[in-house]
Amino acid sequence: MKKNWEQQRLEMVQKQIKARGIGDEKVLAAFLQVPRHLFVDPNVANEAYHDHPLGIGLGQTISQPYIVALMTAALQLNKHDRVLEIGTGSGYQTAILSCLVKKVYSIERLSPLIKEAQARLTNLGYHNIVFACQDGNDGWESEAPFDAITIAAATAKIPPKLLNQLKIGGRMILPLGSPFFQRLTLLHKKEDGYDINHLCGCSFVPLISENQ
Ligand code: SAH
């Protein structure tokens, strides 16, 4: 018999996330709650909990569950945090973040994707999220500084405006590298610069710069 969504979610959390070393109970609880199958095209919903990314249209992808978990856990979020997300895409990571923090500011440059994500997240009852359709490289100046920033698209260098909009003591996670291969990079901002840690290799769609 085909496993139901909750069983598939539980298996995803146990085999893909917990077994690979992510033990933060709040993060695991968020992955158990968010109905990932509702964030993908209905034609591929049966693959929503599989261990790989999936297409979401317009050449973009919803990341592999483990990578979303790794990025989320690395940010060490707490419930008072205000988080900036660049690359809303399907809104899946937005939903995960929404379970863990006070408010999510989510930016996406492709209007059909952000409209769909916003409708989906509102229907599912996630209310602590605001959206903007613009170039994420500019960040969200009027709402800065942020406790954490997550970038879901590949970039060769740390976007300077985003670094400026991060609090001292804040964390940023981003795929840093060439268009073909990046290193998932965690940055801790300090008074006099930042510390940097590379977590693993990864492959994301590019962070488009509107000014190029
Ligand atoms: N977190 C998403 C993954 C989205 S893929 C999810 O869980 O589904 C990366 C997204 O970044 C794409 O939707 C792409 O359109 C968007 N993107 C790329 N460059 C961008 C930019 N400069 N500003 C905002 N969004 C951008």
Image (spheres, rainbow, N blue to C red):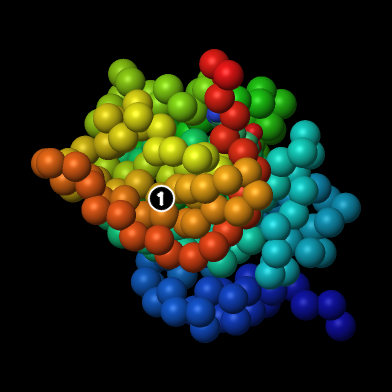
Evaluate whether residue 128 shows in this view.
no
Front in this rendered view, residue 94 or 153: 153
- Provide the residue designation for mark 1: 173
Q: Residue at x 63, y 79 (%)?
A: 11
Quick check: 205 left or right of 68? right
Can you say whether 87 is above or below 211 in the image?
Answer: below
Quick check: 72 left or right of 42? left
Can you say whether 168 is above or below 4 in the image?
Answer: above
Evaluate whether residue 109 shows in this view.
yes
Front in this rendered view, residue 191 or 77: 191
Q: Residue at x 27, y 30 (%)?
A: 164
Can you say whether 142 is above or below 95 in the image?
Answer: above
Front in this rendered view, residue 119 or 161: 161
Which SS class for mark 1? strand
Q: Residue at x 34, y 60 (%)?
A: 197
Front in this rendered view, residue 148 or 174: 174
Classify the position of the C terminus by image quarter. Answer: top right
Q: Residue at x 31, y 24 (%)?
A: 143
Quadrant in which residue 65 is drawn: bottom right
Image coords of residue 88 (percent x, y)? 57, 38
Image coords of residue 169 (percent x, y)? 18, 47
Graded by Cα atoms within 10 Å as few (under 14), some (14 to 19) or many (20 or more), the crowding at tag 1 reads many
Quick check: 194 left or right of 77? left
Q: Amino acid at mark 1?
A: Ile
Image coords of residue 118 (percent x, y)? 60, 32
Q: Any atom of ligand 1 within 8 Å of the CB at mark 1? A: no
